[in-house]
Amino acid sequence: MSSCAPTSAMPVAAAPLIGLVILCLLGASADPEAQLEDLRDRIRRVQADIESQTERRDEETASLRKAERDAAAAARALRATETRLKESRARQAALKAEVEAGRRQLESGQKALSSQIRAVYTGGRAERLRLLMNQEDPARAGRILVYYRYLSDTRVEEINRVTTEIKKLARAERDLAANTAELETLATTQADEARELKAAREARSGAVARLDARIRDRQSEAKKLAAEAATLEALVEELRRALVDLPEADREAFSTLKGKLDWPTAGVLINDYGQPRAGGSIKWNGVVIGTDRGRDVRAIYHGRVAYADWLPGMGLLLVIEHGDGYMSLYGHNETLYKRVGDWVEPGEVVAGVGDTGGKSRSALYFEIRREGHPENPHRWFRNPLSAG
């Protein structure tokens, strides 16, 4: 199947988008890296056209896109800093334990060495001199001299051990001091990034308010939803065609997993597949799962990331291609942790739940598609979602 084949199922509203991105590289290389770079290039062109259309059509949506991307970058930076902070605190706890153990070990060695030195001092050199002058029992004198040499060797070993412990303790204390300084720096960075994230979210709230103010009636909302749906359909179709020639991993076919999968995140069902939107002119092609902001979003199965960027109506969207024409879509994320071309494993964290796309509450939008067509996701999962 050619990756440049036309499709009759393309929405009319998406024609300008596809008109730009339908350009294909003739004679594409069989090299997987070259094919992957070709995919990334095509997705960049798709994204550039989406952004161009958004700028022309909708200043408020363009403003929202920038605000949500800025907020995502701030959230991603804050998460990375918090991870480093957690690791540094764990390291500090280990270093403190090491320092305490070293001090105990040093104290024990010092006590043992003190006892030996005290014994030598108490006995003095007179005892050894008497043994040398006593010729009544040379064998006994020899045994005692051997014993003295043994004690002397033991003292040397104890001195060496105490010296080693002193050096180890000093090194551990230096490491602890450096770690404490790192913690202070990370704490300052964390506070700065938290302020940046707060400012970005406030800017995003302003953009959402301006967008909402423009949509004054149900007809305007339906028009907006139709445009967003057409953009998503165009993107999915372009992805489907772009992925045709890419090699697939040797894994169990996705089609065999119906009824065996785990949902990508924990939460409650807010909007369900097939339910009407905007007065019934449009229906939900997936489910909206209400949950906490920042909660992990996990890949439902092995696959390759085909898209990872902002899309009107979807916010920060991740699309994973699973082979055999199947894709899973994850929308409204606060942050994305993967990029186009990355392989993911079942259950791997790929994003964090958010409210991007101008939503009023944090939730995950999720779809499963086959050959570009949405399927009822409930049939694929072992457990039902509870109603919100």
Image (cartoon, helix red, strand yellow):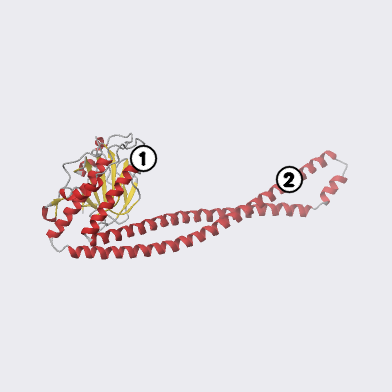
For the N terminus, the quadrant is: top left
* Pointer 2 with pointer 1, Cβ within 8 A: no
Question: As drawn, is 81 to the left or to the right of 289?
Answer: right
The secondary element bearing badge 2 is classed as: helix
Q: Where is residue 243 in the image (x, y as percent from the top left)?
A: 28, 40
Question: As drawn, is 277 to the left or to the right of 302?
Answer: left
Q: Distance between the residues labelled 2 and 1?
A: 69 Å
> Please, is residue 58 above or below residue 158 in the view?
below
Q: Where is residue 185 in the image (x, y as percent from the top left)?
A: 47, 62
Callout 1 amino acid? Ala
At horizontal 20% and vertical 44% (from top left) the residue drawn is: 378
Please give the label number shown on residue 153: 2
Q: Position of residue 239 (x, y in %)?
A: 26, 43
For the C terminus, the quadrant is: bottom left
Callout 2 amino acid? Asp
Residue 130 can be seen in this image: yes
- The quadrant in which residue 306 appears is top left
Around disc 1, counting alpha carbons within 10 Å, would you say few (fewer than 14), some (14 to 19), or many (20 or more)?
few
Residue 360 can be seen in this image: no
Residue annotated with mark 1: 34
